Amino acid sequence: MILNVNDLAFHYKSHETLKNINFSINKGETTVILGPNGVGKTTLLKCLNSILSPQGGDILVKDQNIRQMDIKQIAKEISYVAQKNEPARITAFDAILLGRHPHIRFKTSIDDLKKVDAIIKRLNLSHLCLKYLDQMSGGELQKVSIARALVQQTDLLLLDEPTSSLDLKNQTDILGLIRHIVKEHQIAAIMTMHNLNTALRYADQYLFLKDKTIYGAGKINEISSKMIEDVYGVSVEIIYHKGFPLVVPIENKKAA
């Protein structure tokens, strides 16, 4: 077991955002957090790596309570890709190299440089190596951020809307690579997403958030149309194409 979350609760000042959050993540699994805007998906991710401090509950990473870990320890276990990344006057190569920082003792090693070079080639980012982040498009910046998280080589990867700035080809390339790395290296990934069909194609498990807590959780093939309707308030039909589930909204003829 890589992650255990028990009775997590979080609120901003007096506004309760999350309550009674309980779930666990195993090795080799990609889990997607789903739900409408403002339900707390990003907040939950930020609680999992101590960007935000929950007011209640425990988060255990490989049986170690995250409250008892310092920043460097957390960075060795958990990597995080934010939904939006601020551009800076730093090259893509140096930005990706920052992902090795938790593992560097005295100075950057040849092994660190080789790991950065390998992930750059794997994500086809060689042409961006010397380009500054503040000169990049949103999609280029997102790919660099994902590369930095992957080169960090943690057992838990958190991604907040990782494909929101990417075109269709880059979406499929990146999500396919993340899924492959999760399986190959037996780590775990947790992603938030708005696109249900993309989520159902690349994830193994789902968490639906509703009314500040987990409405439903399980394997992707267990998702029902009623569950989606209850969470999003939209009538849908789930059909299968080449073994993959597709969510198709049902037109409301009265509203039309």
Image (spheres, grey):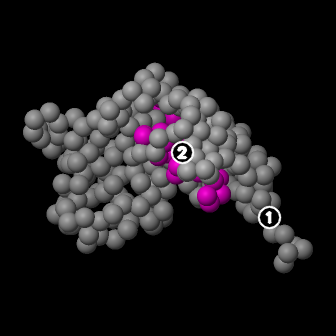
Q: Are marks 1 and 2 in contact (CB under 8 Å)?
A: no
Residue at left offset 29%, top offset 65%? 87
Structural distance between the alpha carbons of marks 1 and 2:
30 Å
Residue identified by numbered label 1: 250
Mark 2 Cα-neighbour bin, 10 Å: few <14, some 14–19, many ≥20: many
| Front-lying residue, 106 or 148 | 106
Residue 59 x %, y %:
50, 31
Element at label 2: helix
**Marks 1 and 2, the one that precedes in the sequence:** 2
Res 109 visible: yes
In reply to whether residue 149 is colored magenta, the answer given is no
| Front-lying residue, 36 or 256 | 36
Which contiguous range is marked in magenta? 26-50
* Quadrant housing the C terminus: bottom right
Q: In the picture, residue 76 is in which quadrant?
A: top left
Residue at left offset 29%, top offset 70%? 136
Q: Above or below — where is 23 with respect to 117?
A: above
Mark 1 residue type:
Ile
Q: Is residue 204 left or right of residue 216?
A: left
Mark 2 residue type:
Leu
Residue 10 x %, y %:
57, 43
Residue identified by numbered label 2: 44
Residue 34 x %, y %:
62, 50
Residue at left offset 37%, top offset 68%? 138
In reply to whether residue 49 is colored magenta, the answer given is yes
Mark 1 Cα-neighbour bin, 10 Å: few <14, some 14–19, many ≥20: few
